[in-house]
Amino acid sequence: MFKKVLIANRGEIALRVIRACREMGVETVAVYSEADRESLHVRFADDDVCIGPAPARDSYLRIPRLIAAAEITGADAIHPGYGFLAENAEFAETCAASNITFIGPTPVQIRTMGDKAAARAAMIANGVPVVPGSPGPVEDVDEALGFAESIGFPVIIKAAAGGGGKGMRVARDADDFARSFQLARSEALSAFGNGSVYVEKYLERPRHIEFQILGDSHGNVIHLGERDCSVQRRHQKLIEESPSPAMTPDLRKKMGDAAVKGAKSINYVGAGTIEMLLDEDGSYYFMEMNTRIQVEHPVTEMITGVDLVKEQIRVAAGEPLSITATPEMRGHVIECRINAEDPNRNFQPSPGKIDVFHPPGGNGVRIDTHAYAGYTVPPFYDSMIAKLICHGRDRAEALAKMRVALDTFIVQGVSTTIPFLGRVMADPHFVEGAVHTKFLEQEGAYLLKDA
Ligand code: ADP
């Protein structure tokens, strides 16, 4: 086992990893930017190193500084969390070259899945269904239009290097196509430094369903059930739950087997997520694989009782997974992401000092947060300040717990999405479980407006 783990991240995920390490008797190192001096992850780690000014590109994204911090403090492993360098193959390689274990998959696995066009090709080669579209990247607008016409409009043009909902454009017809193609290309180039794009059929009202994967270096690859992340705003997840209200045991077996097959095809090691779209007609398609721990991992932890971060650490140290078959899923779990944003001002970020912070609690209520009364939310990073996760015996009980928890969650000083989330919990479509990725633009559009 490792002696000391450096966490190359901030916020709630840095705290989450520190807790897992401490439970395992492993020492920790926090790194922080000048804007995060007062953060809890700095306080709770055994060692801490300032790695630069506030902007992430000058601190959390600076590979040489992270490696130097690990060397100075004697860390023998680095946990990247999510975001920042979590899916950066060069970072994983640099760790290896410096004799530091990267807690995550191999650089080759990160690279294969990080290029969405390459990942599609790998899945096709292994018989995993993918959304109909171009088999790989498309070179020019004529070739792309050819694919679009053969699969039929609407289509979505996606950046091969895409992530975080960026670099995607929908084209409804051939007239619309050339413009959307150019926009997707230039957005891809400016956001990811790579203008490579591909074309997929655009599904009108799919559900986003993803499977949690764990693999080890002893040949075990399992899934831990699904998470339904269909409630999204601008392709960003806001609410996640498990089991999916659309799931049946038979469909879970089929989609879960496909997910495991996809992960096994690259001998996946570590925690990862296979994201799929489930169409209204029951067809399902591989969309992408995320090669890291996800924001919404607590949903799976609560429903299975498995600590995913400890499994990641164990597997990176060369140990086998502590479970080698899909565990039982007990009850129902819902997670809400609480952001410091103003729902009345188009969800504009609301950084600043939190004066009052009173999180809810009770049976089956979990909060993952780095916020506290007196904490200042910096304007430089993402706006999530807490994750609220509720576990009930069934969906109705999980929903009731979530309503009470949101209602008794008091945050003053910054605006938050708590009131908006409370309204979603009362929406008849959501209560029915009848949602899809366009829910907040269509049936639920009123939720984004009234306050
Ligand atoms: P990112 O990596 O940027 O998060 P994804 O490929 O995971 O992008 O897609 C994010 C979201 O975009 C999905 O959850 C879904 O809402 C929407 N989306 C992606 N591809 C399609 C598609 N072919 N049809 C309909 N919606 C899609």
Image (spheres, helix red, strand yellow):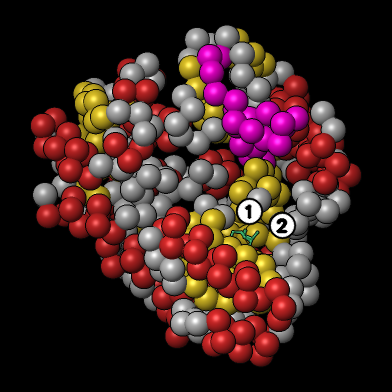
In the figure, residue 184 lies in which quadrant? bottom right
Observer-side mark, 2 or 1, equals 1
Residue position marked by numbered label 1 in the rendering? 235
Question: Which segment did they paint magenta?
Answer: 334-354
Query: Is residue 306 among what the camera can see?
Result: yes
Query: Is residue 326 among what the camera can see?
Result: no
Q: Residues within 10 Å of mark 2 (few under 14, many from 20)?
A: many
- Secondary element at image label 2: loop
**Residue 343 inside the magenta-drawn segment:** yes
Q: Are marks 2 and 1 in contact (CB under 8 Å)?
A: yes
In the figure, residue 313 lies in which quadrant? top left
* Closest to the observer, 157 or 397: 157
Q: Residue at x 58, y 59 (%)?
A: 210
Residue position marked by numbered label 2 in the rendering? 437
**400 is higher (above) or lower (below) than 93:** above
- Secondary element at image label 1: loop
Q: Residue at x 61, y 84 (%)?
A: 145
Q: Is mark 1 within 8 Å of ligand 1?
A: yes
